[in-house]
Each structure stands twice: as C-alpha cells, then as structure tokens.
Image (tube, rainbow, N blue to C red):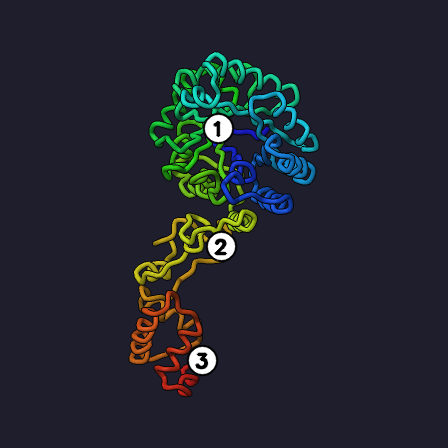
Amino acid sequence: MPEASSDRVIVFDTTLRDGEQAPGASMDLEQKLRVARALTALGVDVLEAGFPAASPGDYEAVAALARYIEGPTLCALARAHSDDIDRVTESLRPAQRKRCHVFLATSPIHRQFKLGLSTDEVVRRAVDAIRHARESFEDVEYSAEDAARTEPDFLCEVVESVIEAGATTVNIPDTVGYAIPSQFAGLIMHLRRRVRGIERIVLSVHCHDDLGLAVANTLAAVEAGARQVECTVNGIGERAGNCSLEEVVMALRTRADHFHLRTGIRTQELCAASRAVAKGSGFVVARNKAVVGQNAFAHEAGIHQHGVLSNALTYEIMRPEDVGFESSQLVLGKHSGRHLLRYRLEQLGYRLDDAQFERAFVEVKRLADHKKELHDGDVAAVVDVVLHGAAGSEART
C-alpha cells in the first residue's frame, strides 16, 4: 500500500476508470495501455485500472494492465457486492501491488431513490463488503459515494464501521460537485475529530467539477488532513469532469510555502501524460487549460512580454520546463509591443535603425489586425517591405 505521511500526499489516478466514464471518452485496450504507461512514467502512486464488473471488455483491460504495468499500485472498482469484489480479485491477480476499491452510497437521496436501503442496511452492507474484500486484499479502499451530501454524523458511523471491518483507505467523495471548500474542509475535520481509529487509515477525497470547485475542494480537504487525492489527467470525467491531477499537483508544488506538502509525481512528465490522455480519449485540451494548455506559458500582451523578457517570474509562477514544456512562448500579435518585435528581429538576424524599426512596428501592427498570430515569415516579409525589397538582405547580419 502507498505510504502517506504528515507531509506526503498520495496521488490516486482514476483517468482509466472515472475519466473514461465521460461520454465519448471510451478507450480500447491499446489506448489504455499507452495511457497507463504514461501514468507510470508520471509516478502516480495508485492507478485505478477500471471497473471489472462493468463489462467483459473492462475486465480484460484491467487484467491486461495487471499483467503489463509495474510500478504503481493497481486498483479496480467494485460495488458492495461479493460478485463484483470477486471480479476485482480475479482481474488483479497478476499485479505486484493491488487494491480493491469498494463503494456504496451513503446520502439520503441515494439511500431512498437508488438503493432503497435504511441507514442500518447501508452500514451492514458496507461492512460485509469490506470484510469480503479483505479475504483477498491487504489494501482495501472504501468510498462513501455522495459523502458531501451525507449527514455528517451518519457518515462518521459508516467510516468508523468500515475501519473496524478492515478498510485501509477511506474515501470521501464529492460525487456530484456540490461542496464548497470551507464546508468540505469542515467535513474532513469533523471526521478526524469524531471517528475512532481514523489515524490508522489514509483519508482520501474524490471531487467532481460541476461547480468548477473540484481542485479547490481537494486542496481544502488536504489542508484539513486528507492525505490521498483522487484525480484525472486533464480533469476528464463524468459531466464536468474530475479534479485535475496536473492542477492539484502543481498547486501543492508551487505553493509549498503554504501547504508544506509534497507528492511523488515527476512533474516534467505532465505534458506527456496530458497528450497521451488527449489522444487516447479524443478530448482536446483547451488552449487556456491550467498547467498543460497551449496558452499556459504563452504571452501576447506587450506589458507581459516586456516583463517576461526581463525576468520570467514577473508573469510566470511556474517554470514551463517543470511541467514538460520546452520554454515560454512569446506570441507576436496585435497586443504585442516594441520589446518583443525588437527581440524577434534580433533572433532573425535583422538590424534596423530607429526609423526603420518604427516603420516595421507600424506594419506589424497593421498585419496583426488581420492575423491572430504572426510567424517568422511574416516578420521577414514586413522587414523586406520596409527596406524596399532587395535592400532588405543588406540589413541581415
């Protein structure tokens, strides 16, 4: 089982299970293997491979990952049914390190409309499932589905019961993205105060992004004492998605002065993992996506470009190299200023006097009003126009 400590956060990746449940994101076995290898290179602690009882294809995919993937703990999901748990046992048999992940909903709305169970029946079924899983697994996780909408005192009862039954990790999901950070942190603190034996297990959180708060809720829970974060690369997942792995990891790293926590993620592999997931799922990463988006380290505004040319720290709180980009990108466009144009001209080997430079700047602005981004060929064409054709070659060094 991955080890948490007071300053170490376990990263549980569910891209291949919860992430793949996003409509349109299904992957075939070869795609899953490529993504799993990228996640292994990234250094995730736990890799949730799938839900073996969901379909024969899911079972085969989990079994294949158990045979071929080494490094992270391989995990598979099961409902609180013995048949589901047995499917997890069979599919993960070849894995070196393995975990059974059992879930059962606890909220009033799920108890009434989905399960048709009383509170006592929920506790009994959860306990029986954990005990059954412990017959085959030393590492067993329990998730209280829709925990964020569960009565806090009843949630305490469920968590205490599954700990007594042998759960080694207990997950508190915000399944429908309903929580807000202060409330979710308060729930984690309530559990830590009230649940006997909670110091013996790893307390985990799994947040969805329906209100755009998945990362914020996850970080609030970590501050309150959770030591496992469940997340997906690129934040893919059902509805609005899951907590984004790259965002929560880089928040913990970039603001280590605040959190005083660390993960085992090799952050230089984040862009590679993002590209692998985008290719496998078919979900394009938005240009403005935090950390791994095309624009994450791109600058067009002249004031920003001047700052970055002077010192990247003026407008960049992370180094692009630390997440897998080669460098920052200074985009020459209609918002750019003289500093970037002069820098680009120097890179291209042009030396213009002040009057020539000002004419070039005017022409660049005029062209940029019609093109979203200017490339080196555009700049060269502008300079040649300013220098009247053939005379342009005389300005090159």
Q: Amino acid at mark 2?
A: Phe
- Comparing labels 3 and 1, the label whose residue is closer to the camera: 1
Horizontal and vertical percent position of residue 350: 41, 77
Task: Specify the label residue 347 is tagged with.
Answer: none
Classify residue 201 as left or right of residue 179. Answer: right
Q: Which residue is mark 2?
A: 325
- Observer-nearest residue: 18 or 324? 18
Of the 4 image quadrants, the one containing the N terminus is top right
Classify residue 112 as left or right of residue 28. Answer: left
Q: Which residue is mark 3?
A: 397
Residues at marks 1 and 2, CA–CA distance in whole angstroms: 30 Å
Q: In the rendered view, would you say 374 is above or below 293? A: below
Residue 41 appears in view: no
Q: In the rendered view, would you say 38 is above or below 260? A: below
Residue at the spot 38% in from the left edge and 52% down from the top edge: 316
Q: In the rendered view, would you say 237 is above or below 361? A: above
Q: Amino acid at mark 3?
A: Thr
Q: Which residue is mark 1?
A: 204
Considering every residue shown, the one lying at the far top of the view is 120
Q: Label 1's element?
A: strand
Number of residues whose C-alpha sits closer than 10 Å to that of mark 1, classed few (under 14), some (14–19) or many (20 or more):
many
- Comparing labels 2 and 3, the label whose residue is closer to the camera: 2
